[in-house]
Amino acid sequence: MRAPIVEFLFDVGSPASYLAFRRLPAIAARTGAHIEYTPILLGGVFKETGNRSPAEVPAKGRYVRMDLDRFARRHGIPFQSNPHFPINTLALMRGAAGLKGSARFMPYLEAIFTALWERVRNLSDPAEVAAALSAADMTQEEFQALITDSDVQAKLRLSTEAALQRGVFGAPSFFVGDQIFFGQDRLDWVEEALAGWTRAVFAQVASYPAAEK
């Protein structure tokens, strides 16, 4: 039986992407879904869509920080607002794009998300990046070689362009089939869509003749 798929489009500099990163595995377990992790560059998305960070609107920024705290408490997720936010994540997201598909991808995301949103490190500082990378068993030299590779740079650019073509305007964004959902506060809707997919597939399988099952 084909498992449902949720595409998770993220940037590590987005605190809402961090909360989604923590919440999605439980949703996948409940629905039998596969998570497709897709790095995008949020700065590039903002530039092309005219969107901007809530941090640029003081009242909205204060509200969003409170709301993120509420969600973190509700779901038991360790979370702190990073005083160094916003951080230029170009290098970090090139790292994610370059490692996608390898065994080092998830340890890298774990290390970077943890450094940013649990330990509130300033990942604009190369020394802090090096410390975070050590948790993923990666050296600064390996990281630099990865993010300066032209193919890796193209991967991130192309994934961001593809996201824009699909109507993405911020992060995190999710796709279940053709349905788009924006924000970790829409994960209940994502789970509902995944559950509906699973029910539809079971119904389809149940309708097959016995010889085809």
Image: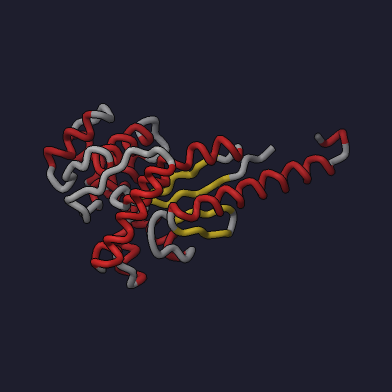
What colour scheme has been applied to the protein in the rendered image? secondary structure
Quadrant of the image occupied by residue 65 = bottom left
* Residue 51 % position (x, y): 34, 69
Quadrant of the image occupied by residue 75 = top left
Could you tell me which residue is drawn at 34 percent across and 32 percent down? 107
* Residue 143 % position (x, y): 22, 38
Could you tell me which residue is drawn at 12 percent across and 44 percent down? 125
Could you tell me which residue is drawn at 16 percent across and 48 percent down? 124
199 and 155: which is toward the camera: 199
Could you tell me which residue is drawn at 41 percent across and 40 percent down? 22
* Residue 9 % position (x, y): 42, 52
Q: Residue furthest top?
A: 137
For this view, does 157 lie left or right of residue 37? left
121 and 41: which is toward the camera: 121
141 and 172: which is toward the camera: 172
Q: How many marks?
A: 0
Please tell me whether residue 192 is drawn above or below residue 210 in the rendered image: below
Quadrant of the image occupied by residue 73 = top left
Please tell me whether residue 54 is drawn above or below residue 73 in the rendered image: below
84 and 134: which is toward the camera: 84
In the rendered image, the quadrant that contains the C terminus is top right
* Residue 119 % position (x, y): 22, 38
For this view, does 159 lie left or right of residue 108? right
Please tell me whether residue 36 is drawn above or below residue 56 in the rendered image: above
In the rendered image, the quadrant that contains the N terminus is top right
For this view, does 177 lie left or right of residue 117? right
